[in-house]
Amino acid sequence: MTHTVHFRVWRGDAEGGGLADFDVEVNEGEVVLDAIHRLQATQAPDLAVRWNCKAGKCGSCSAEINGRPRLLCMTRMSVLDLTAPVTITPLRAFPVLRDLVTDVSFNYAKAREVPAFVPPPGVAPGEYRMRQEDVNRSQEFRKCIECFLCQDVCHVVRDHEENKTAFSGPRFLMRVAELDMHPLDAAAETGLDRKSTAQEEHGLGYCNITKCCTEVCPENIKITDNALIPMKERVADRKYDPLVWLGSKIRRRGA
């Protein structure tokens, strides 16, 4: 079954732009990216849109559909209200390059700021041993496809450009949390305190756990409940729990 859907698609570049109206034929079972491709093929061959796998695994086709951050390739037309215009706009938290393509280099800069996993001393690759429970916990976070929808929806980044220098956003705070809870990470033995860096360098305190990042994650990662809240608890223990504070003083004196 084919029917015509009215689309409003943002066209423009860093200098400015606006919404352009298009009527596009849509077939039963199609996703929004199918409609965008048909729009390119029939009416707007110069429309810029980023995509790659069309299977929800590369994270390339992130955009905002009716104001909600989504993957174009994983949003079925059937879940949208087709009696009203379908509005497609670029990710609002990042600078527009052209049309639906944004400059997400902020995220790659933040990724480089997260110190990598530190291998345990005296243990060769292939000799690592972990409990299955720890493997499962880490594996959830490794499902991330870096679509940056969580970064886009986070109001700390989205509504306050000035926060970007001090705040890494949910995707990379999740990475810090994953490394901090990794039983084999030997960062502390090199003098790297991941709890301290989460708070002081990556802006964990800016997060007010609204769970909006979890709500838009296409991989259904429980970013807030399983990464950010536990990380906040560990940071608070380090700073405010008198027993933890006393233990750190004793260990430091013993060293």
Image (spheres, rainbow, N blue to C red):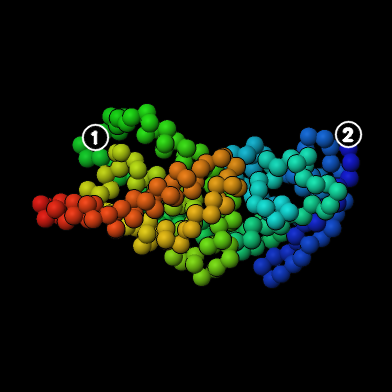
What residue is rendered at 58% in x and 45% in y? Answer: 217
Residue at x 29%, y 58% (from the top left corner): 240
> Is there any visible trace of residue 190 in the rendered image?
no
Q: Nearer the viewer, residue 167 or 123?
A: 167
Q: Three-letter amino acid code at disc 1?
A: Val
Image location (x, y in percent) of residue 184: 29, 38
- Whole-number angstrom distance, CA of label 2 to CA of label 1: 60 Å
Report the residue at 25% width, 49% height from top. 188
Mark linked to residue 3: none
Residue 76 falls in image quadrant = top right
Relative depth, front residue between 70 and 13: 70
82 w.r.t. 9: above or below: above
Q: Are marks 2 and 1 in contact (CB under 8 Å)?
A: no
Q: Is residue 198 left or right of residue 67?
A: left
Considering only order in the chain, which callout, 1 or 2, is on the residue closer to the N terminus?
A: 2
Which quarter of the picture shows residue 131?
top left
Q: Position of residue 207 (x, y in %)?
A: 47, 58
Amino acid at the residue labelled 2: Met
Would residue 184 be found to the left or right of residue 172 on screen?
left
Residue 208 in sight from this viewpoint: yes
Extreme-left residue of the structure: 254
Q: Position of residue 251 (x, y in %)?
A: 15, 51
| Residue 55 picture location, percent across and down | 64, 37
Q: Residue at x 57, y 52 (%)?
A: 212
- Residue bearing the label numbered 1: 123
Image position of 62 with respect to 16: above or below: above
Q: Secondary structure at mark 1?
A: loop
10 Å crowding of disc 1: few (<14), some (14-19), many (20+): few
Query: Total number of numbered labels?
Result: 2
Q: Tell me the residue that label 2 is attached to.
A: 1
Q: Is residue 184 above or below residue 163?
A: above
Disc 2 residue crowd, few under 14, some 14–19, many 20+, Cα 10 Å: few
